[in-house]
Amino acid sequence: MSILVIDLGSSSTRAVLFDVQAELIPGAMTRHPSQFNADNEDDPRAAVDRVNEVLAELTAKFPKGITDIGLSCYATSLIGLDENHEPVTPVLTYADARPAEDARHLRAEFDEIETLQRTGCRIRSNYWPAKLTWLKRTQPDVFSRIRWFCSLADYVCWRVFGIFHTGISVASWTGLVNRQTNDWDETWLRVLNLQPDQLPSIDQQSATVKQGPWQGAQLHPPLGDGAAANIGSGCTDPSRVAVTIGTTAALRIVRETEAGGGGGGGEQGGGGRRRARPPPGPRAPPPGAQTRRNP
């Protein structure tokens, strides 16, 4: 038995296998490079191709025994899909600052601190409210063709494993999740004129894969890469700090707060005390832009 883990990074796509003791299986790692374009966009079809390529290489050497599948992805991405689940937009990433003006207009209209408390995210160009507003304003014909909105991790789960869902970790980076309900935020849905069925369901349980060589394996809800880095490095309480240095850099610490309290976002539980994940927020800007403020 083995556990397949896929990471959708901004510089590469990786796949590795672990045994049931969470030990890396020798030789069970593949990697393909990736790169954003000049507008800090990714190509959704190319991203799926990269995943299929690393999986083909891995399963050629280890063809059997995968029981569980986990996936992590760079945080905050947005794809518009048509009624056939085909992408009509590129992957709009966290690094795309073009919606900065739309974020400023939204901040002028809505209380940013109240929004932060409700969703865990400020009103900035990184998150979906500003990105959706920008997309509708600048590309109305494209926007009108969109039936579903999802993150890159959700799209990969659909195309590779046949399951269209998301997890609270990835969903919380959209800025559209209500921290009290762990579901899509009704206020933002109303403001943005979105319906819940335009978004993937937020699941906390695994789903059984029913297609391909992974048929019967359990696909677990995808994680944002920051949360995965904290868990993988054992930084799950205030005594340890996780430092990530990659295409961007980040420092994250996990703390306990009262449910619904504090200034950061978290994976909300059912009441009492909860274990909060690191507050959603933009990672450091790309090299060469370190002094820029988040718009």
Image (spheres, helix red, strand yellow):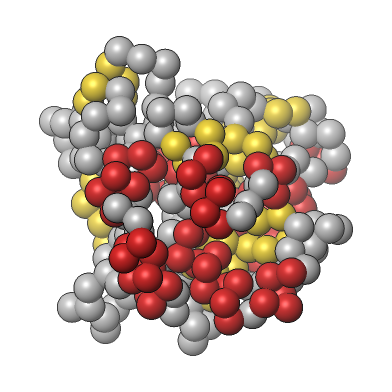
Quarter of the rendering containing residue 149: bottom right
In the rendered view, tell whether residue 96 sits above or below residue 51: below
Tell me where residue 194 appears, x and y as whole percent. 63, 52
Which residue, as the protein is rendered here, is positioned at the far bottom?
Answer: 38
Please give the name of the residue rendered at 30% of the width and 28% of the height, measured from the top-left corner.
260
In the rendered view, tell whether residue 271 sits above or below residue 106: above
Is residue 145 shown left or right of residue 107? Answer: right
Please give the name of the residue rendered at 49% of the width and 49% of the height, measured from the top-left corner.
188
Which residue, as the protein is rendered here, is positioned at the far left?
Answer: 239
Which quarter of the figure is the C terminus placed in? bottom left
Please give the name of the residue rendered at 35% of the width and 56% of the height, measured from the top-left corner.
110
Which quarter of the figure is the N terminus placed in? top right
Tell me where residue 22 appears, x and y as whole percent. 47, 29
Q: Foreground residue, 27 or 274?
A: 274
Please give the name of the residue rendered at 52% of the width and 68% of the height, measured from the top-left corner.
133
How many marks the image carries: the answer is 0
Q: Is residue 154 visible?
A: yes
Is residue 153 shown left or right of residue 107? Answer: right
Which residue, as the protein is rendered here, is positioned at the far top?
Answer: 272
Q: Is residue 279 visible?
A: no
Tell me where residue 232 appears, x and y as whole percent. 37, 37
Q: Foreground residue, 174 or 217?
A: 174
Is residue 262 shown left or right of residue 59? Answer: left
Q: Foreground residue, 91 or 162?
A: 91
Is residue 45 shown left or right of residue 233? Answer: right
Q: Foreground residue, 212 or 186?
A: 186
Quarter of the rendering containing residue 287: bottom left
In the rendered view, tell whether residue 260 sits above or below residue 154: above
